[in-house]
Image (cartoon, helix red, strand yellow):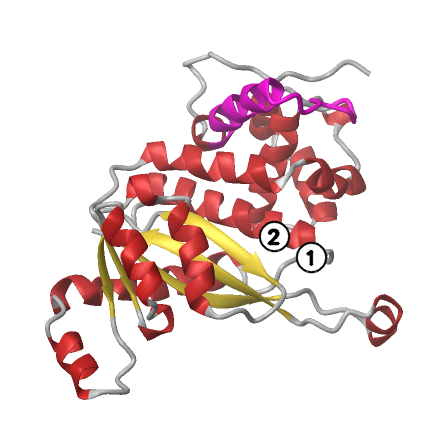
């Protein structure tokens, strides 16, 4: 089957899906080719499959209902260069997540940052996504015991843009996860705000060594910690509430439950949800 490359470089295309999803994904496709990742094993270009994943998340569809919706939305098919007789099977879209690695999803997330003018203050916090509800038989046969996915996000406080995500099926402490996330984004940070869960001297030292101002509250085990908390810039620290607002937006707009069942697919689904949220934010900003 011939690989479908999609239409690229046509500036007359003004549909939001093409302008804000297709073109970034085309760049991702070129990047993945430079890393030796095969493109289009199923007959569809990788950027097309990423666009379909993003469109499914944006419209709140299942894999099966997504194919049904594509049959009656010619503008989307035209931007993806797919004929109605060549639509992929729902299982093809689902299994595409096996080939779209977390590295590719992160590159798409990083590409969405170029759609915004980022501020100087960022904040980090953690919440959870519910894993899809499964039957008791499925849970018994697959040892499906973990019912939630701990998700840590790094957010730009000026625009509400998600800078990075980290997922875990365990319940690790916030400080080591925060250090891992912040290390990947030191070049984007000037000030970082976080709650007491990220109270760790090694994390503060890492941030200061790289020119980042930490606004992390201390756990008040001693009076000196209380005094140090009182000296924090409250106006900047209170911008941390943007992270909680972003989590509410993710729950209300894209759902609190993940549709995929395998943990590695769920990690990639969360990263794509963050990318779609950033794309939607560039179309209809929610934060001043």
Give the camera-side residue of 64 and 222: 222
**Quadrant the N terminus occupies:** top right
Q: Nearer the viewer, residue 126 or 249?
A: 126
Residue 3 located left or right of residue 179: right
Contact (CB < 8 A) between labels 1 and 2?
yes
Residue pictured at 45% horizontal, 28% vertical: 15
Mark 1 and mark 2: Cα distance apart in space: 6 Å
Taking the image as shown, residue 206 lies to the left or right of residue 2, namely left
Question: Which secondary structure class fits the magenta region best?
Answer: helix
Q: Position of residue 167 (x, y in %)?
A: 55, 57
Residue 195 part of the magenta segment: no
Range of residues picked out in magenta? 21-43
The residue beneath circle 2 is 267
Q: Which residue is mark 1?
A: 263
On screen, 82 above or below 214? above
State the SS at label 2. Answer: helix
Where is residue 186? Give x, y as percent: 33, 44
Q: Determine crowd level at label 2: few under 14, some 14-19, many 20+ residues with C-alpha closer than 10 A.
A: many
Depth check: give the residue in front, 97 or 64. Answer: 97
């Amino acid at each position: 089957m011939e690989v479908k490359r999609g239409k690229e470089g046509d500036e007359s295309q003004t549909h939001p899906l093409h302008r804000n999803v297709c073109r970034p994904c085309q760049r991702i496709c070129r990047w993945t080719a430079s890393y030796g990742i095969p493109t289009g094993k199923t007959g569809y270009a990788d950027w097309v499959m990423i666009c379909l994943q993003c469109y499914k998340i944006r419209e709140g569809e299942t894999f099966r209902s997504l194919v049904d919706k594509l049959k009656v939305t010619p503008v989307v098919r035209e931007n993806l260069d797919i004929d109605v007789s060549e639509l992929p099977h729902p299982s093809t879209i689902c299994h595409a997540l096996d080939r779209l690695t977390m590295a590719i999803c992160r590159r798409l997330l990083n590409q969405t940052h170029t759609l915004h003018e980022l501020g100087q203050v960022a904040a980090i916090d953690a919440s959870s996504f519910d894993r899809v509800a499964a039957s008791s038989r499925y849970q018994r046969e697959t040892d499906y015991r973990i019912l939630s996915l701990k998700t840590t996000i790094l957010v730009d406080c000026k625009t509400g843009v998600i800078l990075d995500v980290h997922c875990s099926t365990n319940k690790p402490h916030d400080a080591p996860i925060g250090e891992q996330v912040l290390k990947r984004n030191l070049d984007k940070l000037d000030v970082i705000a976080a709650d007491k869960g990220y109270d760790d001297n090694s994390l503060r030292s890492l941030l200061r060594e790289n020119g980042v101002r930490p606004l992390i509250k201390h756990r008040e085990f001693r009076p000196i910690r209380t005094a140090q908390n009182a000296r924090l810039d409250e106006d900047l620290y209170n911008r941390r509430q943007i992270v909680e607002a972003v989590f509410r937006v993710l729950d209300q707009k894209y759902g609190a439950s993940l549709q995929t069942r395998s943990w590695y697919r769920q990690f990639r689904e969360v990263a794509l949800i963050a990318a779609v949220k950033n794309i939607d934010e560039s179309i209809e900003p929610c934060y001043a």
